[in-house]
Image (cartoon, coloured by chain):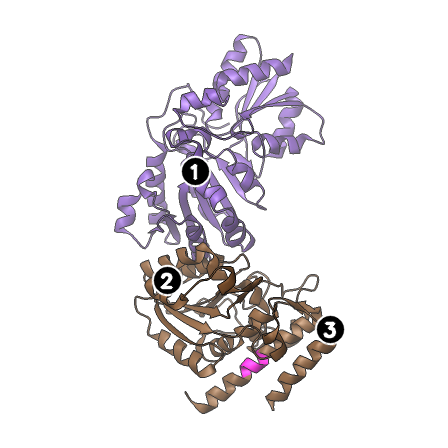
Chain colours: A brown, B purple
Amino acid sequence: MDATLKKRLERLALEIRIGVLEQMKARGFGHVGGSLSIADALAVLYGSQMRFDPKNPDWAERDKLVCSKGHAGPAVYSALANAGFFPYEMLKTLNQPGTSLPSHCDRNKTPGVDMTTGSLGQGTSLACGMALGEKLRGRDARVFLIVGDGEANEGQVWEACMFASAKKLGNLVLLLDVNGKQLDGCTKDILDTLDLAAKLSSFGFDTVSIDGNDIESVYNALERTRNGGDKPYAVVLNTVKGKGIAAVEQAKSNHSMAVSTEQWNEWLLSLTAQLD
Amino acid sequence: MMDLIYDGSMDSRLFKDILGKTIKELSEQDSDFIYLDADLMSCIGTCGWATEHPERGINCGISESNMIGVACGLAATGFKPVVHTFGPFASRRVFDQVFLSAGYAKNDITIIGTDPGVTAAFNGGTHMPFEDVALYRTIPTATIIDITDVPMLISVLKQCKDLPGVKYIRVGRKNAAKMFADGTETPIGKAITLREGKDVAIFASGIMVHEAMQAANKLAESGIEAAVVNFFTIKPLDTAAVKQYAKQCGNIVVAENHSKIGGLYSAVCETLARENTAKIDVVAVNDEYGEVGPQDYLQKRFGLTAEHIVETATALLK
């Protein structure tokens, strides 16, 4: 991987994290853990992989992103603001009355959000339909699907995985965010999903398992999905929930957090210091 | 007035054959039209065609929730999907998927639920939706259709293809009484007066329209002039027609192959609650589950016959 590109994407990941905290600081609370865990993947996606035009968010030929773990909306919004889909200042309206930035992704409210999600599992089928649609339209667009490891409890995820494989959706890239935690605690204690990479392989996905918070690993894993083919791709992102803010990483319960403005400011400062 | 050809006789054509034929024709006419099924293609005669055209007829296997999501994803890429499965799976099994992935997300799809209510017959209680209309009515701006005959099914399928929003069509797979001449168009949202009357108005949908027509004949023998109005569009309800007949007749019997809770009867009562213009009663299924048996047995068992309509109307007029 080119060193300049790597540096640029690492900086973008940092900026995405800063945008996440800015949103939550303005509202006082938010789904911080699962937003921070996918910041690096979103940086690689919007910074090097996806074809899009922020001035024309509905451009038919664009690559699409479905964040099926819809509660990570703030991470997506931060990536979109950094990509120029809407003014950065808008991030401060997260969950305010009448906002365009609701907790969970909504394609009818936010420029650049390609699909509405929030009821876990549903985004997986939606992404399959979109990938099939792109194929039937003869377009070479890729559809990126972000799924959480907690979300993998949902049966619909596996129905969709069977479908993706059976219908040969080689333009579908499933990014599974294995941050090891869900709302009530550790995934292995609540409903152990065992080896998710092995599961996805057995469902017919071309699967790799990588450090999902390492830009170069994510970049290399996604570059190879440009090849298309008959198999859908899965990239198992082994991540840390709350990645980038030590106190959030270490918090026992970090799915959604409400902390003081001073606390958000302190965390923001620790990130902005790394920008220089 | 529609071209009504009703004489009580049955159409020899089966709904399932018409469904298969119309889906194929719509697919040939509109390259954006796409059909999805959950391993029930053989039940509506689409299997052969879909196997030859797997890009136009998608068999999703026995995974209804996924099928709804896939259809919505296809809608997001510009297609006009129609999905089919049996009524219970097309409603309660996929309710959250239809509500959010289709309705809330504004992915426009048409859902066909076959074998509504007692038409599920030998598939029995597990397959007998008396609550599908109630569920769909709670989805904002959904369109709900209860099919009466073959020309209506063809007309409604054509209209739903291009209508925005969530569209739910409940229809049997067997045959039904002949009602309208072939080629009749039945505009969605507009109730159809089949028979005029001044004493009581029978509001019916689906298979109960035939029963309502039979009941009106019998009521006429007793000197009671019953109007029969086909409310095949349960949502959006033709509230003007409801209010007009409430005023005109002062007595209304609602007849539906559905639970008394949440269906056409509820919609009519909600419409007239502030009007205070008519007495209303209902011929529909009580608050109970379905069971197995031939359709004629089940119609008697659950009180869905012309005789029940006659009794209810007569009691209302006393």
**Residue A90 sits in which quadrant?**
bottom right
On whether residue A14 falls in the magenta region, the answer is yes
**Magenta region includes residue A18:** no
To which quarter of the image does residue A159 belong? bottom left
Q: Crowding near pointer 3: few (<14 within 10 Å), some, many (20+)?
A: few
Give me the disc on residue A137. 2
Chain part drawn in magenta: A12-16
Question: Mark 2 and mark 3 in contact (Cβ < 8 Å)?
Answer: no
Which one is closest to the eye, mark 2 or mark 1? 2
- The tag earlier along the polypeptide, 3 or 2, is 2
Q: Residue at x 56, y 33 (%)?
A: B263
Indicate the chain on which mark 3 is placed. A
- Up/down of A14 relative to A111, above or below: below
Where residue A251 appears, as percent x and y from the top left, is: 62, 72
Name above or below for residue B267 compared with residue B318.
Answer: below
Which residue was labeled with disc 1? Answer: B155
- Frontmost residue, A7 versus B263: A7
Closer mark to the observer between disc 1 and disc 3: 3
Have a look at marks 1 and 3 and say if they share a chain: no
Q: Distance between the residues labelled 2 and 1?
A: 28 Å
The amino acid on which the numbered mark 1 sits, given as a three-letter code, is Ser
Q: Indicate which disc residue A260 carries.
A: 3
